[in-house]
Image (cartoon, helix red, strand yellow):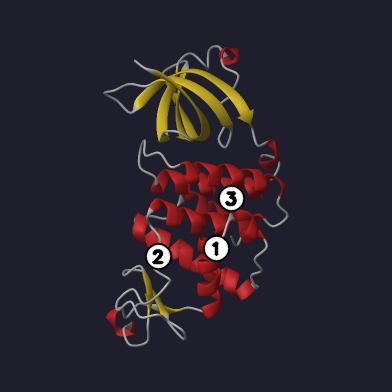
Amino acid sequence: MPIYKTEAIVLNRREFRETSLIVDFFTRDFGKMTGIVKGVRAEPDKFASNFESFSCNEIIFYRKRSSFLHLIAQADKINNFDGLKQDIDKISLASCMLELIDATMAQEDKNEEVFSLLNTCLKELEVATYPEKIVTIFKIKILALSGFKPHFDSCVSCSTRILGESKFSLSLGGLLCPRCSKKDRTARSIFRGTVASILHIEKNDFSTNLKLGMNPQIRRELEAILNAFLNFHLGKELKSEKILRNLAITV
């Protein structure tokens, strides 16, 4: 089996047999991948990592040709993101990002932009005063990078540029102009400011987007639309979103 080395962020882990772990990672060089860590529960000092969720590690692994389950030979911790673990709200928000990565990214499909986005967002989340904004930016960016991007540039039906009022269609995946709005009777009205915020976030880098102001009304609509779109196209609600609701957080 060939051996490889890459940076990897832990998405989740589960126990396997008596002493081992199976760990899902999102890696810089191989995208989402799964590895088995043998004996780590019996000998925790065997690896320089505890494979906690959110932690970023440099892993060395043997890549199997006939399976998606690879053998982790070594793991050295780069960043444990300890600043997240002191705040239950931030833990829940970070869990939402990890779950969204897991739900939208294909197995072993390399995407360095997604890795960099996740790594940057986790670092910013550690020190953020308003962490909800970071997760909103993350959701919009990951939809674009994973191919789930809603159509906000023009009417999704006739491609006409929309300058005034519009409605958002979950089933068609984008905006409808007034002339085409009857094509989806369930389409909902959307503020122009919400559309402008989404387009701004899609087109600008992360540091620029952090400076973007959002009034509470637009922020609430933005999250309602993003969550509804994700639930519709993924066919389920993210578990982390349910937890956030129970914590009474408006993300």
Quadrant of image for the C terminus: bottom right
- Residue in view at x 36 percent, y 77 percent: 155
Given the image, on which type of amino acid does mark 3 rest? Leu
Residue 38, position in %: x, y?
Answer: 45, 15
Look at the numbered discs 2 and 3 and tell me whether their residues touch, using CB distance below 8 Å.
Answer: no
Q: Is residue 192 above or below residue 62?
A: below
Quadrant of image for the N terminus: top left
Q: Residues within 10 Å of mark 3 (few under 14, many from 20)?
A: many
In the structure shown, which secondary structural element does the residue marked by tag 2 occupy?
loop
Q: Determine whether, in the image, residue 212 is placed left or right of residue 11.
A: right
- Residue in view at x 45 percent, y 85 percent: 165
User: How far apart are the alpha carbons under marks 1 and 3?
Assistant: 19 Å
- Residue in view at x 41 percent, y 63 percent: 229
Q: Nearer the viewer, residue 138 or 202?
A: 202
Q: Nearer the viewer, residue 180 or 16?
A: 180
Q: Earlier in the sequence, mark 2 or mark 1?
A: 2
Given the image, on which type of amino acid does mark 1 rest? Ile
Nearest-to-viewer mark from 2 and 1: 1
Residue 93, position in %: x, y?
Answer: 58, 50
Q: Earlier in the sequence, mark 1 or mark 3?
A: 3
Q: Can residue 248 be seen in this snapshot? A: no
In the structure shown, which secondary structural element does the residue marked by tag 1 occupy?
helix
User: How far apart are the alpha carbons under marks 2 and 1?
Assistant: 13 Å
Residue 201 image label: 1
Q: Disc 2 designates what residue?
A: 150
